[in-house]
Image: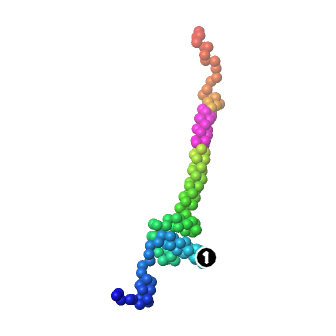
Amino acid sequence: MEPQQPKNSVQKTVQNAPRQRDRERTQNDLKLALRRLQQTEEKISIKRVAEEAKVSPQLIHMRYPDLAEEVRQIIGKGTREQRNQKQALLQVEREKNRKLREQVESQFKEITQLASINEALRREILLLKGLAGENVRIGNFRGNNNRN
């Protein structure tokens, strides 16, 4: 006959045994821990959920990425949300950049036109100064090839 162990020692052995691996049970415990943290209005983080469920934060990151994403969304740092927000900001900045490039191009064209007009006006000023001065004679010089 085998020696019988008292019932108390069997219970103590079961209580001290490491937690058995059960994915569904762990996932349920994690969800319950998250709900408890939400109800107590404490600061929510993956680490706090892990502590509440008595598992490691790495386990949540590696084995339960959906739950990790749910926690990030609750605290406003969801990867999809952040990506979409950054994408929207990038689109706004690209549109601003496009408008500024168009403005630079139109101003460059305007500067070119003004420089051309300015040069034409300078030549006209020189001509008018010459006409107003005593150094210029006005006459018909084309048909005077007949010298007597």
Residue 123 appearing in the image: yes
Quick one: quadrant of the C terminus? top right
Front-most of residues 18 and 73? 18
Residue, far top? 148
- Read off the residue under disc 1: 39
Locate residue 40: give its quadrant: bottom right
Q: Report the magenta stretch's main SS.
A: helix
Figure disc tally = 1
The quarter of the image holding the N terminus is bottom left
The picture places residue 20, in percent across and down from the top left corner, at 44, 75
Residue at 59% x, 39% y is: 109
In the visual, does 6 lie left or right of 132? left
Q: Is residue 24 magenta?
A: no
Q: Is residue 1 left or right of residue 12?
A: left
Please provide the residue range marked out in magenta.
105-123
For the residue labelled by badge 1, is the local secondary structure a helix, a strand or a loop?
Answer: helix
Amino acid type of the residue that numbered disc 1 sits on in the rendered structure: Gln
